[in-house]
Amino acid sequence: NIASSKKTEYIKSMVKKGVIALFINILSFQSSCYQLQDEAIRGLRIIAGFPAFRHLVLKKNVLSIIIKILEEKYSPDKVTNFNKNSDINRSPKQQYLMFLRNITWALSNLSRGTLENKYHHGFIECFYGLIRAVDYVDSEQKKYKDVIGYKRKIFMSIGWSFNRMLSNNDFQCNKIDITQCLLKIAFEDDRGLYNTGAWRAIGLILNAKHHKEYKQIINKSIKLEKENERLRQENRENEILKQENRKLKIDLANYQHLVESRTMTRNMNWM
């Protein structure tokens, strides 16, 4: 709560007392639940929002720790203590996605400004890890609507972070891999509410050297996505037909039951 203060002098005082090292130790600790790690990443996220302290967080090897956390498979047993006194009823997966959202927010703050080359690869690995973690939860979630909101917000932050980093001419990375990653984010939302940063980052890549190679990848990915959308539309139409068929069967069964009941009543009256 103290770290959430917007006053620089409070943050500066806490940093002098070693709070960054404390948060890093908590984050790297193999806890039985995500709650402590979530609180630690919240604190680091707020501190990283101040340009004067951003490099101090990065120097503590925070990117490697986040990569290690994201490599671990999601475990519902590790989120049982989240919000236990809260009136808001969230499923374990929703609470885990909130943890991923705070990680994304922290990385977004850390990626602002000019980055040293040695951190470039670490940021990319973190963002890839976040996408894999979100996709894993999404694939395991039966009620997709419970996940999609968190997923899009996480992808939105990743897209804008890549856009900021690519705006730096010194940013060193494999732009082909990043292009494929950004296209995945860009195609996640067809309404354009969450994918603007990703499309802008793709535009920066197209303006770079050897853009013809990237353009070919983008064109192939767009064609593939259109085909996937066509298949998804067919699946949706098939699901609608199945629902209508089920409804017709129920209506037919109800009608047959009604006819049989009336016939039985008529026979009893004749007797």
Image: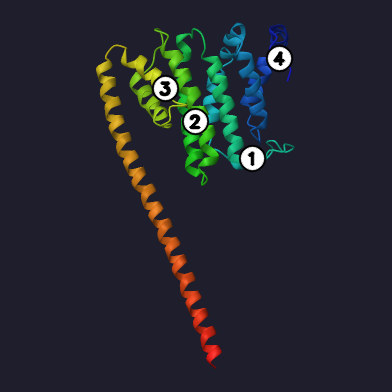
Residue furthest out toward the bottom:
271
Q: How dense is the environment of label 1, judged by Cα within 10 Å: few (below 14), some, or many (20 and up)?
A: some
**Residue with the mark numbered 3:** 198
Report if residue 158 is visible in the image: yes
Residue ID at (37%, 49%): 237
Taking depth in this image into account, of 84 and 252 the one nearest to the observer is 252
In the rendered structure, which disc, 1 or 4, sits on the residue that comes first in sequence? 4
Q: How far from the left and from the top, in percent, is residue 21?
A: 66, 16
Q: How far from the left and from the top, in percent, is residue 180?
A: 36, 26
Residue ID at (33%, 44%): 231
Q: How dense is the environment of label 4, judged by Cα within 10 Å: few (below 14), some, or many (20 and up)?
A: few
Q: CA distance from mark 1 to mark 2?
A: 18 Å
**Residue with the mark numbered 1:** 90
Q: Residue 152 got which mark?
A: 2
Taking depth in this image into account, of 252 and 175 the one nearest to the observer is 252
Q: How dense is the environment of label 2, judged by Cα within 10 Å: few (below 14), some, or many (20 and up)?
A: some
Q: Residue 147 got which mark?
A: none
Q: How far from the left and from the top, in percent, is residue 11?
A: 69, 11
The answer to the question of whether label 1 and label 4 lie on touching residues, with beta carbons closer than 8 A, is: no
In the rendered structure, which disc, 1 or 3, sits on the residue that comes first in sequence? 1
Residue type, mark 4 in image: Ser
**Residue with the mark numbered 4:** 5
In the rendered structure, which disc, 1 or 2, sits on the residue that comes first in sequence? 1
In the rendered structure, which disc, 2 or 4, sits on the residue that comes first in sequence? 4
Taking depth in this image into account, of 240 and 219 the one nearest to the observer is 240
Rendered position, 136 above or below 166: below
| Tag 3 secondary structure | helix
The answer to the question of whether label 3 and label 2 lie on touching residues, with beta carbons closer than 8 A, is: no
Q: CA distance from mark 1 to mark 4?
A: 27 Å
